[in-house]
Image (spheres, grey):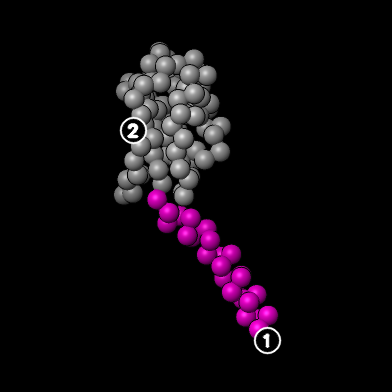
């Protein structure tokens, strides 16, 4: 009888884990970028930064000359790595700001 209860608890926990992850705060990183001159530059930068496993989504702004990186729930930012990825894509990373995602 005890095993039956353990199986039920395990199944309930497995169903709840995705819900717990959704409730976790998301970290965001904004990094200034020098050298973007066209929409293709922004697109390439988004693709390059999107390769990082903890990155959920990236938006590069040609007008604001920055990237906005949203991380997967529960993960921590690695700003040095993101700056290296920006550099590897052929651009110059600048000031970085780390914060929490605004949920509306």
Label whose residue precedes the other's in the sequence (1 or 2):
1
- Residue 102, given in percent of the width and then of the height, sits at 32, 45
The range drawn in magenta is 1-25
Above-or-below relation of 90 to 11:
above
Q: Residue 35's spot in the image, x, y percent?
A: 40, 13
Residue 19 in magenta stretch? yes
Residue at image coords 43%, 54%? 24
Query: Which residue position holds label 2?
Result: 97
**Disc sitting over residue 1 in the figure:** 1
Is residue 94 shown in magenta? no
The image position of residue 84, as x and y in percent, is: 49, 23
Q: Nearer the viewer, residue 58 or 97?
A: 97
Q: Residues within 10 Å of mark 1 (few under 14, many from 20)?
A: few
For mark 2, give the secondary structure: strand
Residue beneath the point at 49% across and 29% down: 81
> At x 56% / y 38%, what residue is drawn?
53
Spatial separation of the CA atoms under disc 1 and disc 2: 54 Å
Q: Which of the 4 quarters of the picture holds residue 79?
A: top left
Left or right: 29 in relation to 46: left
Viewport quadrant of the N terminus: bottom right
């Amino acid at each position: 009888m005890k095993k039956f209860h353990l199986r039920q608890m395990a199944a309930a926990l497995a169903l709840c884990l995705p819900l717990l992850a959704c409730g976790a705060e998301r970290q965001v990183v904004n990094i200034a970028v020098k050298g973007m001159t066209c929409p293709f530059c922004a697109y390439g930068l988004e693709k390059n930064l999107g390769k990082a496993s903890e990155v959920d989504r990236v938006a590069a702004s040609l007008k604001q000359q920055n990237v906005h990186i949203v991380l997967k729930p529960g993960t921590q930012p690695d700003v040095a790595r993101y700056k290296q990825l920006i550099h590897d894509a052929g651009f110059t990373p600048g000031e970085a700001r780390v914060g929490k995602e605004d949920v509306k």
